[in-house]
Image (tube, grey):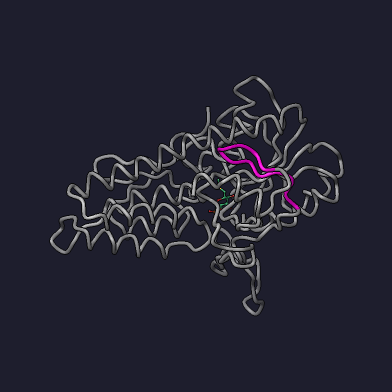
């Protein structure tokens, strides 16, 4: 079975698996306010593009006015506030736009309507994950090994994930393949989270440091690389966790297909290309002082972009809930997503 539910909403509380504590402890964090939700997204208690969107949608439902009661102004303020939590994953803004539209709609029963919309966003994501699993499985079937980066599994979404969904699909059908998970410096989402959730599900996983990927590809054990995305521009350039782009270059060199799996909520057709995707720059200490241990002298500067952009021409196929787009480009993606927008 995939990981337990990453996100739940009960008794006016957003309940999140605290991903900063995995794999040592499986704990949940309760968010009862918009500010707590903002903080949870920013600190990566909840992370991964679709999961951030779902959490933010529920976060809006927690808004209260000065009198402690919900009102339209408080909901709209919550939308603005949560939009500042992280800049790259477009799913956040996509979900918040849906919540804003309801809040602005002037309807009665706003609390009920907003909660219904957040639940719909959550439910739709479950369906998208399963469809991505079905659509991506034939691309991975029969491969001995598959390499992935960061965590694009159940912890990053509502359920099966995006890049891991085809793997779960095949696993359910009794087909086993070895998953190689880059540890994913600096926050180790691959080593901590992907390895944890695949192990929970009984899928065989081997963790490697990011710098081992080239040597691994050279052995021929990897039949495909598959990753998720945080934002895909109109031409197919895809932002994902830092270290994805060099993996795509390595895959091309070794003639291994490079797949990006993402729901339609991850596309930003307003951006012509990946150069326009805002890339989050995170704290120095994530690199210089991991787990409280200083490994970089104070005198040295540090770079810590959380994401990089893989140009579309390095992507063999994009897998969505609607199907697959081979050799993605602007025209093919517009056609693929057209009916949805
Ligand atoms: C299905 S999630 C796809 C991406 O969001 C994932 O690969 C990723 O880069 C997550 O980054 P994170 O910084 O952990 O939120």
Number of numbered discs present?
0
- Residue stretch rendered in magenta on the structure: 314-325
Q: Determine whether 302 is above or below 273 in the image.
A: below
Q: Nearer the viewer, residue 177 or 185?
A: 177
Residue 94 is situated, as x and y percent measured from the top left of the image, at: 44, 54
Q: Measuring 56% from the left and 46% from the top, which residue is drawn there?
A: 337
Q: Determine whether 77 is above or below 150 in the image.
A: below
Residue 153 is situated, as x and y percent measured from the top left of the image, at: 56, 40
Q: Is residue 174 left or right of residue 248?
A: left
Residue sticking out furthest to the left = 67
Residue 126 is situated, as x and y percent measured from the top left of the image, at: 46, 36
Q: Measuring 56% from the left and 54% from the top, which residue is drawn there?
A: 230
Q: Nearer the viewer, residue 55 or 39?
A: 55
Q: Determine whether 106 is above or below 196 in the image.
A: below
Residue 35 is situated, as x and y percent measured from the top left of the image, at: 32, 60
Q: Measuring 43% from the left and 36% from the top, which residue is drawn there?
A: 5
Q: Is residue 231 left or right of residue 26?
A: right
Residue sticking out furthest to the top = 174
Residue sticking out furthest to the bottom = 299
Q: Determine whether 62 is above or below 147 in the image.
A: below
Quarter assignment of residue 172: top right
Question: Does the magenta-highlighted stretch encompass residue 315?
Answer: yes
């Amino acid at each position: 079975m995939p990981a337990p539910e990453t996100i739940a909403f009960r008794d006016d509380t957003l309940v999140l698996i605290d991903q900063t504590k995995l794999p040592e402890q499986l704990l949940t964090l309760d968010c009862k306010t918009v500010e707590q939700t903002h903080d949870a997204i920013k600190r990566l208690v909840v992370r991964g593009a679709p999961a951030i969107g779902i959490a933010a949608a529920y976060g809006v439902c927690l808004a209260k006015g000065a009198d402690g009661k919900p009102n339209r102004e408080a909901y709209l303020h919550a939308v603005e506030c949560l939009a500042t939590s992280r800049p790259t994953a477009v799913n956040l803004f996509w979900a918040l736009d849906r919540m804003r539209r309801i809040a602005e709609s002037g309807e009665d029963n706003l609390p009920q309507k907003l909660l219904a919309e957040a639940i719909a966003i959550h439910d739709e994501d479950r369906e998208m994950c399963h469809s991505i699993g079905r659509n991506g499985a034939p691309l991975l079937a029969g491969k001995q090994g598959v390499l992935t980066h960061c965590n694009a599994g159940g912890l990053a979404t509502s359920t099966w994930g995006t890049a891991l969904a085809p793997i779960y699909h095949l696993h359910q059908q009794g087909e086993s393949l070895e998953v190689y998970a880059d540890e994913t410096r600096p926050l180790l989402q691959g080593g901590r989270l992907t390895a944890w959730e695949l192990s929970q599900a009984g899928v065989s996983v081997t963790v490697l440091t990011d710098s081992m990927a080239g040597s691994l590809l050279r052995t021929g054990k990897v039949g495909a690389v598959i990753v998720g995305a945080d934002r895909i521009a109109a031409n197919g350039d895809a932002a994902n966790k830092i270290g994805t782009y060099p993996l795509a270059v390595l895959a091309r060199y070794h003639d291994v297909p490079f797949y990006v799996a993402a729901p339609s909520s991850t596309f930003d057709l307003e951006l012509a290309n990946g150069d326009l995707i805002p890339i989050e720059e995170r704290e120095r200490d994530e690199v210089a002082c991991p787990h409280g241990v200083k490994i970089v002298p104070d005198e040295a500067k540090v770079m810590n972009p959380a994401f990089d952009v893989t140009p579309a021409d390095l992507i063999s196929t994009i897998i969505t809930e609607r199907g697959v787009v081979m050799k993605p480009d602007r025209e093919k993606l517009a056609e693929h997503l057209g009916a949805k927008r």
